[in-house]
Image: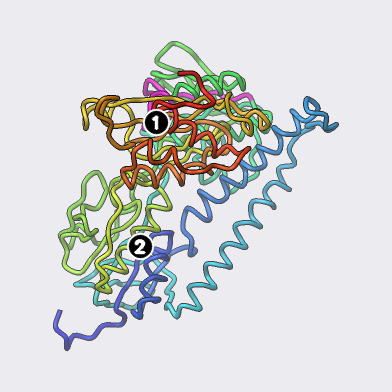
Amino acid sequence: MSTKERTDSDLVVLGGGPAGYSAALRASQLGLSVTLIEADKIGGTCLHRGCIPTKALLHVAEVADAARRSEAIGVLSSFTGIDAVKVGEFRDNIVARLYQGVTSLIKSAGVEVISGNGRLVGPRTIAVAGRTVTGRFVVIATGATSKTIPGIELGPRIITSDLALQTSISPRRAIVLGGGVIGVEFASIWASFGAEVTIIEALPRLVASEDTWSSTQLERAFKRRGIAVHTEAKVDSVQESSSGVTIDLSTGNSVEADVLLVAAGRVPRSVGLGLEEHGARLDRGFVATDDRLRTNIEGVYALGDLVAGPQLAHRGFQHGIFVAEEIAGRHPVGVPDHLFPRVTYSHPEIASVGLDEASARRTYGDITTGVYDFAGNGKSQILRTAGGIKVIQAGTAASPGPVVGVHMVGERASELIGEAQMTVAWEALPEEVAHFIHAHPTQNEAFGEAMLAIAGRPLHSHR
């Protein structure tokens, strides 16, 4: 771009979700002028229809489960049901407070915000709300939207996660179509609320992107909770009536419920942005970028769920910070996708980072694996959680290498994954991590014990 060509901002950001607003905030911190364009609300799907409201409901589910179990530990209480209206108010109040916080941050950073649907119309130029905005650089961060399934039309009783979160639905019987992260989280919520839940998954196991060990642990836990799981099952037909939904499966089974949640994943929101018209390369809807998140259009970057890889809010945050620093000439170091911690916030939780066992074998050939069971951890016994921690190490006992994968299943596993991420990212040896001190009694001790075990000197586990 010619230095004489007029620009409105150093950086124009299209999309105000985690990737977009983090790019705007970091760029402003670095002294760049920023224009942020958002069609809905700052915070995106994560804040308004995803991470935050879902986890609020999962906390309610945890409290409901605790009420059911309370008499077993001497607390005289009981679970009598869910007040859907109050649950909705709790969820919405959390979202509202966080929304107020992030909009305040954007305002105090001096970022110009334009409301409307933006579209790339020229070199580094976005048309929005009857005007055009040109930047030295443009960031596209429009995120993703719920995926639908051909032949299954949405209706009053056939819904996506967006509608499930916008209303105060608390069904008696529910079918969840899809055994990925979104599906198992909603199945977990509704089961805790007292519903009879059935999960339908076309693949051989739940959460198929996770290690096979994690899937097995989750399926066992769900069976104990009374959640029915049909794997390797495809949908033959769906019938919706005023009173419910019936789904016929390729296995010959039929399942009836009050509501059917279509949880088939999410697809990038790349249509109608003017990207293809200006030469951007797309693959299955994802925008192709290089390792610096640059598209093939000069001066245009793509971030977050728009770029193929794990669809995680914290990946979006990192992408936004990375690109802002890249544009500002800070030469940031990128984070490979396998080093982003992954968490499924069901009960029990699944948390992982690095490679699963199959990927580790393909990459390194020789690997060593070990599992530390939460049965040996004092705090886990107090919390009455089953599960454990699986560690994957490159190399053999005779020639040990670094930890390349950690997989956890159990209540509060999400709070343990941070140390695992550092261990894998720093290519640490189990022997090195085993020297760290872990306070007693905590679940964090289990991570230390897992490292001791795979290093060949277990303390609270059998060899």
Range of residues picked out in magenta? 196-213
Q: Nearer the viewer, mark 1 or mark 2?
A: 1
Quarter-of-image position of residue 70 = top right
Residue 311 rendering spot, x and y as whole percentages: 38, 46
> Hey, which residue is sitting farthest bottom in the picture?
4
The answer to whether 146 appears left or right of 443 in the picture is left
At horizontal 73% and vertical 48% (from top left) the residue drawn is 86
Residue 89 rendering spot, x and y as whole percentages: 69, 52
Give the numbered dot on residue 359.
Answer: none
Q: Nearer the viewer, residue 457 or 296?
A: 457
Residue 93 rendering spot, x and y as whole percentages: 66, 57
At horizontal 48% and vertical 36% (from top left) the residue drawn is 448
Q: In the image, is residue 313 part of the stretch drawn in magenta?
A: no
Quarter-of-image position of residue 129 = bottom left
Dot 2: element: helix
Residue 109 rendering spot, x and y as whole percentages: 46, 77
Which residue is under mark 2? Answer: 320
Is the residue marked by circle 1 packed among few (<14), some (14-19), or many (20+) residues within 10 Å? Answer: many
Q: Nearer the viewer, residue 216 or 141?
A: 216
The C terminus, quarter of image: top left
What residue type is disc 1 on?
Val
Which residue is under mark 1? Answer: 391
What residue type is disc 2 on?
Gly
Dot 1: element: strand
The mark that comes first in sequence, 1 or 2, is 2
